[in-house]
Image (cartoon, rainbow, N blue to C red):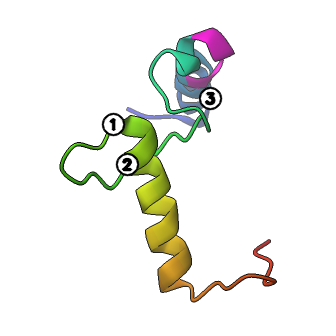
Amino acid sequence: QQTFRRSRKVGRVHYDLSNDFFEAMLDPNMQYSCALFAEGDDLAAAQLRKLDWICERLRLRPGLRLL
């Protein structure tokens, strides 16, 4: 059964890892989420594609700021 104490422990075990660990498996921007791949994309390109897609959906334009 999941408890508050147990969930905190699981979170620490999962996330309290060194940056070296995450740098080994994430893109240069250290994004820890899914990517949007096209044919021939590597992870970094797929992550940038995802960010472009999100910005397009949000209708962000030069000069706008997203907080």
| Disc 1, SS | loop
Residue 10 location (% of width, % of height): 52, 23
Dot 3 amino acid type: Arg
Q: Which residues are magenta?
A: 15-20
Task: Measure the C-alpha gap from mark 1 to mark 2.
Answer: 6 Å
Q: In the image shown, does 61 or 17 lie closer to the viewer?
A: 61
Read off the residue under disc 3: 8
Residue 46 location (% of width, % of height): 37, 48
Contact, CB < 8 Å: mark 1 with mark 2? yes
Task: Measure the C-alpha gap from mark 1 to mark 3.
Answer: 34 Å
Asked which quadrant contains residue 9, the reply is top right
Left or right: residue 42 compared with residue 67:
left
- Does residue 19 belong to the magenta stretch? yes
Q: Quadrant of the N terminus?
A: top left
Circle 1 Cα neighbour tier, 10 Å, few/some/many (<14 / 14–19 / ≥20): few
Left or right: residue 20 compared with residue 33:
right
Residue shown at the point (80%, 78%) measured from the top left: 65
Residue 59 location (% of width, % of height): 57, 89
Q: Quadrant of the C terminus?
A: bottom right
Read off the residue under disc 1: 42
Residue 17 visible from this viewpoint: no
- Does residue 58 belong to the magenta stretch? no
Read off the residue under disc 2: 46
Pick whichever of labels 1 and 3 is earlier in the sequence. Answer: 3
